[in-house]
Image (spheres, rainbow, N blue to C red):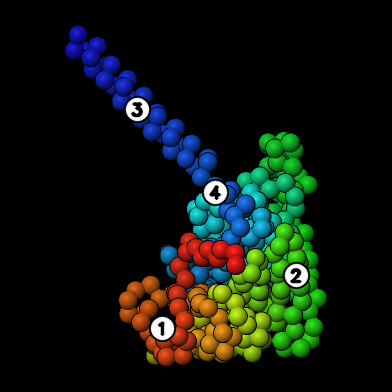
Amino acid sequence: MKRTLALTALALVLFGCDRIVERQIEKNVTRADESVLTSPDLQVVICGSGSPLADPKRASSCTAVIAGGEFVIVDAGPGSWEVLDLANLPVGHLSAVLLTHFHSDHIGGLGEATTQSWIAGRTQPLQVYGPEGVARVVEGFAVAYEHDVDYRVAHHGDAYMPRAAAGAIATEVAIGEAPDASAIVFERNGLKVTMFKVDHDPVRPAVGYRFDFAGRSIAISGDTKKSSSVIEHAKGVDILFHEALQADMIARASTVAARLGRERLAKLAGDIAGYHTTPVEAAEVARDAGVGQLVLTHLVPAPNNFLTRRLFLAGVADVFKGKVVIAEDGMRFVLPPK
């Protein structure tokens, strides 16, 4: 009798465990929130707020914009795809990638964005937009991933993994020679996307993007020095997402590296401040552009504790009186239509 009761109890426990496992699987299978595709709002999700400096809390550059059924990411830094997926976004509906320039921390995740969105159900080639040179970048990733595509089609069949949808199509957006030149990337489903030049010299071309939808707008600076072009093209936007480098902290890192005999590291750290924007300069851009809110991203070095956040924001409030946010991976912004 005791043995029967014990076996019955064990069976009930195992059945309960099976149901727990099944519920978790069900939750994972259905977790993608497709309602964002039919929302009337302009939505932004930070999928990478970090930089080339490794950080356990931050992927490299990536910002997702969702509006009018379009699901777009600006840049695809290493680690950013995992952030997008874990944010429960409908990744199989990724419709475009916009690249700001071709540094590795902005393009390193492009292969995963292309492949994983295909695995998740994308049924058309992924559109990748950028300035001159983007076609070569896309071609390079296609070569690197061509065996992966072959394996998946052979394993699952073309009906489930259609080869025609596997890759990406590059579109190089022609932009003028003037420092503040701009060009329309596309207008569809009520979403207008504008590319504009920025100053990341000696990196050329380098661009930022503006998004307009349902009376709301955002701008993403890309990597840049303080730039009059960003001020011009971010005029009146609801939110400006601007890169930020804390120059004093980087200068200290360079000094310490030199003292320790790490000449190469000291040189590299000393160089990077010259083609980025400090938080105070980003605040000046936000003020002069008359934006509603400033979000600092592409954070160098990442301010992950109270002290570094305080150093990062020193002097910012004296310049820009609007709301200032330090971006974190997974952070969301929702702008209802006006």
* Disc 4: which residue: 33
Mark found first going from the N terminus, 1 or 3: 3
The alpha-carbon separation of the residues under discs 1 and 4 comes to 34 Å
Mark found first going from the N terminus, 1 or 4: 4
Q: Quadrant of the C terminus?
A: bottom right
- Which mark's residue is nearer the viewer, 1 or 4? 4
Q: Is disc 3 placed on a helix, strand or loop?
A: helix
The image position of residue 328, as x and y in percent, is 45, 67
The alpha-carbon separation of the residues under discs 4 and 2 comes to 27 Å
* Disc 2: which residue: 185
Please name the amino acid that badge 2 sits on.
Answer: Val
Q: Is disc 2 placed on a helix, strand or loop?
A: strand
Hey, which residue is sitting farthest left in the picture?
2
Please name the amino acid that badge 4 sits on.
Answer: Asp
Mark found first going from the N terminus, 2 or 3: 3
The alpha-carbon separation of the residues under discs 1 and 3 comes to 51 Å
* Disc 3: which residue: 16
301 vs 63: above or below = below
255 vs 182: above or below = below
